[in-house]
Amino acid sequence: MWHRAAKWNTLRNQMLAGFVSVMIVVLVCAGVITFQSASTLLKNKAEKQIKQTAIQANGRLEALVNQIETLTTQAVNDSLLQQLMLSTANGKTASFGQRQSLMQTANKIQAYSSGVSSVEVYTKDHLRLYPLDDQRLSDRVGGEWIDLAEKEKGKLVWIGIDPKDPESVLAIRRINLIDQWFSSGGYLLVRLERSYFQYQAGFSDEGHPEIMLLTDASAKPVVASGPMRADLGELAGADSQTVTWEGQRYILVKQRSEQTGWMLMILYPLSDITEGISVLRLAIIAAGAVGSLLFIILSFLLSTMITRPLKKLMRAMRNTRQGVLTPNSAVSFTSEINDLNATYNQMVDHINGLIKLVYEKEMLQSRTELQALQAQINPHFLYNTLEALYWSLQEKEQEELADLVIAMSELFRYVIGVADKDEWVTVGEELEHVERYLSIMSVRFGSRLTWDIRVEHGCRTVSMPKLLIQPLVENAIVHGLEGKTRQGTVVVTAAWSPSDGRAVRIAVNDDGPGMEEARCREVQEAMASGRALPGKGKGMGLSNVQRRLQLYYAPPGAGGHGLSIRSEPGRGTTVSFDIPAEEEGIHFDT
């Protein structure tokens, strides 16, 4: 189970899952915000359109009302009507001819307004003067409308649907007598066709799917462009902007007329708004699906571009054979991956160099141990033999030879020490070994060999690999002083390096014949290549010291560490090298 989970828990799958998750969240948030914004915009636009339609419709209604208001005002102020109503108000009975003359007033109103179907005139006692019958006003309208007409003092009062004719609308106004200080002289009742208020005809087209309803003060429909109901009180009293009517959802806008008291209601189908929102929702979902698919493909390609070079790098790491790391030669289109490959290749080169360095050091140590084994030197046997020789010379009172044996014993103890334990010594211990060696050499050369060992303060405690100075002293004696007939001097100096205060400079100087420039260059080339020098002995002393200095103190391929040779013909030779003083063990200057 764990291996199966680890198989899918790869960097590419993690990147792909992360990218897709972020993309889905972004698309969902953007889609929701866009959908909400667009829905609000569409609703606001619909509301604005409905309000604009309501304003236009209400303006048309007000124009129709004002027309009737103007015509009836002119009628009640007609001189003939005023004289007749004044006469009846004073108790005189109107004659048939006078009542018949009211036909001219009614005809004027009907002539200027096609919606007026009849005009009726009543006295203040509710007796009808025109048309010519004996019907009373109280039989036509309710008493509350008569009282309201009295209260309005000559203003046109819109009653609503005619109780005796549902297809008609009634309006009443009081006739004010001008000659009697505008006192009540009777009533003018106007009956209009309901079709007169069909204002919807000016607005109803394909661009206006709304339904318009006009109700009177009692919520009874006056005009309706849609289904007609006997009572629209539910819509008139609705507080919500969204209502359900005839099984369909609508946005409701209401506007009451100040002149008539009637209610204008406009119903806008909610489906017309949601239809646009549905298209928008479908477009958002389609765009999100296409965007997600493209993002998944791009994320897969991007993650592959990143992980494929990493897999090649891992494959190069696994291809390590025989302790040697294999560099990665793959080239990526990503600069960071290329930098990673370059860094890895540099690390591989560096580690391979370190492996080669350690290998060569082990080979050098093994070669040294092999040479010691080949010489079949048993240290304990050698020490015991020298000890016995020392006591024999003491018994024979050969003090000088006894001291020479002791010096040789100490010298062998120093050289044939435990390699792992005594590999590093201090500069002071190395110089003591050099002085013992010089003491032994003085037996051979006598007064022809003199030496001087100079050590600056603090240099004796610096650690260094052992047996680095003694081969240089040996080289100075063999090549510098052995051929001299006069006295020669070897000077060994341990002082702080003038070029680097953190290093100790060891210098071995002789006053021998020196070397020509060509010979000096030949020696340096031989040391650099590790081959033997021509001349006496095996000529490996300087080369071995040079190699050991590079193995201990120089990183692979670096220069600047090793022996420095200065020689002039007739003025001797100086061989020197620097030892870092800050840490013990193998040190690599960078």
Image: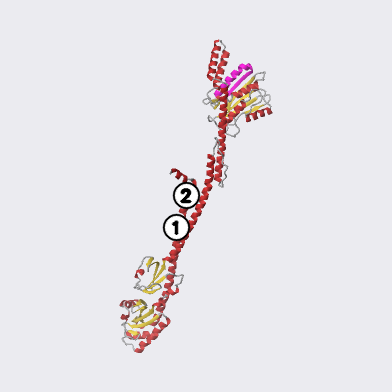
Q: Nearer the viewer, mark 1 or mark 2?
A: 2
Residue 115 percent coordinates (x, y): 41, 79
For label 1, the residue is: 32
Amino acid type at circle 1 is Val
User: Could you say which is closer to the camera, residue 525 or residue 190?
Assistant: 525
User: In the rendered structure, which disc, 1 or 2, sits on the residue that comes first in sequence?
Assistant: 2
188 above or below 227? below
Amino acid type at circle 2 is Ala
For label 2, the residue is: 17
Q: CA distance from mark 1 to mark 2?
A: 22 Å
350 above or below 256? above
Residue 425 percent coordinates (x, y): 54, 25
Res. 454 mark: none
Are the residues tagged 1 and 2 within 8 Å (C-beta)?
Answer: no
Give the total number of marks visible in the rendering.
Answer: 2
Q: Quadrant of residue 396?
A: top right
| Residue plotted at (54% across, 39% down) | 319
Residue 78 percent coordinates (x, y): 39, 84
Q: Secondary structure at mark 2?
A: helix
Q: Is residue 453 left or right of residue 135?
A: right
Query: Quarter of the image containing the N terminus?
Result: top left
User: Could you say which is closer to the camera, residue 270 or residue 492?
Assistant: 270
- Dot 2 crowding, Cα within 10 Å, few <14, some 14–19, many 20+: some
Residue range (magenta): 428-455
311 above or below 195? above
**Residue 511 appearing in the image:** no
